[in-house]
Amino acid sequence: MVDCPWAPEVGWAAPPPGICKINVDGATAGCGGWSTVGVVIRDSRGMVVAAGCKVLNGDYGAAVTEAFAVDEGVRLAMELELQQIIVESDSVGVVEAINEGNCNGEFGMIIQGSLELLRSFRSWNVRYLKRDYNRAAHELAQFAKAAGSSQQWKGVEPPMLRHVLLLDRAKS
């Protein structure tokens, strides 16, 4: 892990120039459905660089779904050829596993894959964010669950997030 010189703040805080922040969230299926993930990547001005929501290929527990969400966020950042990133998740267990390099347990293989991808970035940081402050990614995970489909947006805000993103930008 490459430590960044700024401390996490309460709520959505814009990263320094040149660094993108990736908020991720997972939603478990329940009732025989499929788990989903949401990802929002924003620049230092709070503008959406890319976003996506994905329906996973099964019904996973909360921790595994959150690990898949981090992995999806990192993969999208790689696809965009970003160099410096902060990934924020509301799963303490997943964040700790990544930061400790712990590839054991039910989501160990996913963590291992994410760590391999993270090593290709010039700088990266994975940190915990309270669920209350991870609303944009949460909304996308819920959207994928309701729609039953995966979608991706590049360079535009997903229409269903405009209200959440406006509130976040006002706070930063």
Image: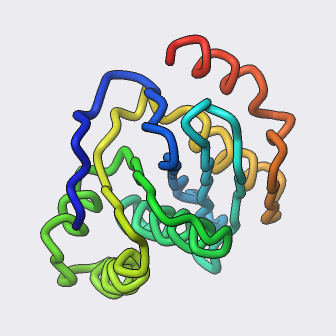
Query: Residue 47, position in %: x, y?
Result: 69, 35
x then y, percent, for residue 74: 50, 68
Residue 154, given in percent of the width and then of the height, sits at 80, 56
Residue drawn at x 45%, y 59% is 84
Which residue is at a point 61% across and 30% down the rendered structure image? Answer: 45
List x then y, in percent, for residue 59: 55, 71
Instruction: Name the residue nearer the viewer: 143 or 157.
Output: 157
Q: Which residue is rendered at x = 78% and y = 27% of the image?
A: 162
Q: Residue at x 27, y 82 (%)?
A: 108
Q: Is residue 123 left or right of residue 141?
A: left
In the picture shown, does residue 54 fall above or below 103?
Answer: above
The part of the image, by quadrant, that contains residue 2 is bottom left
Question: Which is nearer the eye, 50 or 143?
Answer: 50
Residue 154 vs residue 81, the one in the foreground = 81
Q: Residue 23: in sight, yes or no? A: no
Total numbered circles = 0
